[in-house]
Image (cartoon, rainbow, N blue to C red):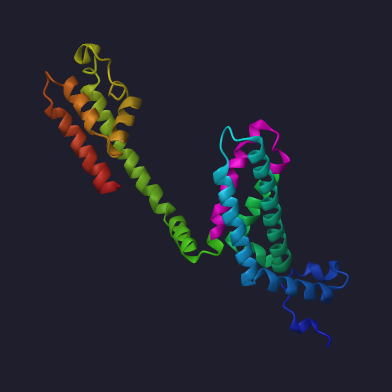
Amino acid sequence: QIVTLDKLVDRNCEGCVQCCVDYQCWLKFQNGLYSVVRDPLFELLITVCIILNTAFLAVEHHGMSHNIKQTLDIGNKVFTLVFTLECTLKLMALSREFFNCGWNNFDLIIVTVSLLDLSFELVDGLSVLRCLRLLRVLKLAQSWTTMKVLLSIIISTLGALGNLTFVLVIIIYIFAVIGMQLFSKDYTPDKFAPDPVPRWNFNDFFHSFMMIFRILCGEWIEPLWDCMRAEEKEGAGTCFAIFLPALVMGNFMVL
């Protein structure tokens, strides 16, 4: 039985008809390839490879033996070959529909980076490409629905997160300037003798900014004690007037 062109799904652009010698034969091959890449067994195989690749990345460490390093290098080449083959098969099967899916574009970027990593693996300055191999873990989102939903939610909230970060920076800036104006003159060696002046202080804007940031991270008791030592003569209540509002507004209200 001859399969006519009308019974085959055409996912190619219009120019492919003129470029291909036997277009009907190509469509048969493409539709068969589409069934393969959409098969659950194929997706399971790729998922297993992703998990194994994640385990290989976790084993890599400084000072490992030559045998382990050689095994990891071989494993990296094998996984790169598998993911490159997967991306190529999907590109051939889906044609222009391949680029309609964001995850397919993400896979293409990962494969490109992995191939560049193999091409420049002997160049020391491009070691950052090796770190980008960790992005392969995110490929699990294609087969793990919950992870895909969570990543989609995170991506959709990036705009609001940027606005929230801007508000947080403004709050840190305000309290940093206030703290610098109030306490910069009091963090002197005679206030902390025989100990040195604390590293976390309000002597300049940078240290003041980092001090407020540390307060928002929850480590505020020790800096508060240092501030009370510096303000022992002037009155330690001023420290509470800065530390507690910064902690409440920044940590509990914004974060």
Task: Check residue 21 for magenta coloring.
Answer: no
Q: Main secondary structure of the magenta part?
A: helix
Q: How many marks?
A: 0
**Please, which residue is most extreme toward the bottom here?**
1
Q: Nearer the viewer, residue 233 or 60?
A: 60
| Above or below 27: residue 237 | above
Expressed as whole percent of the image width and height from the top left, the position of residue 211 reads: 30, 30
Expressed as whole percent of the image width and height from the top left, the position of residue 83 reads: 67, 56
Residue drawn where x is 69% and y is 38% of the image: 121
Residue drawn where x is 17% and y is 29% of the image: 239
Task: Check residue 118 for magenta coloring.
Answer: yes
| Above or below 131: residue 99 | below
Q: Quadrant of the N terminus?
A: bottom right
The magenta region covers 117-140
Q: Is residue 49 left or right of residue 88?
A: left
Residue drawn where x is 11% and y is 23% of the image: 235
Residue 120: image quadrant is top right
**Please, which residue is most extreme toward the right here?**
21
Q: Is residue 57 left or right of residue 209?
A: right
Q: Nearer the viewer, residue 88 or 79?
A: 79
Expressed as whole percent of the image width and height from the top left, the position of residue 48 reads: 60, 60
Residue 126: image quadrant is top right
| Above or below 106: residue 37 | below
Residue drawn where x is 66% and y is 35% of the image: 66
Expressed as whole percent of the image width and height from the top left, the position of residue 113 reads: 65, 46
Q: Nearer the viewer, residue 160 or 223?
A: 223
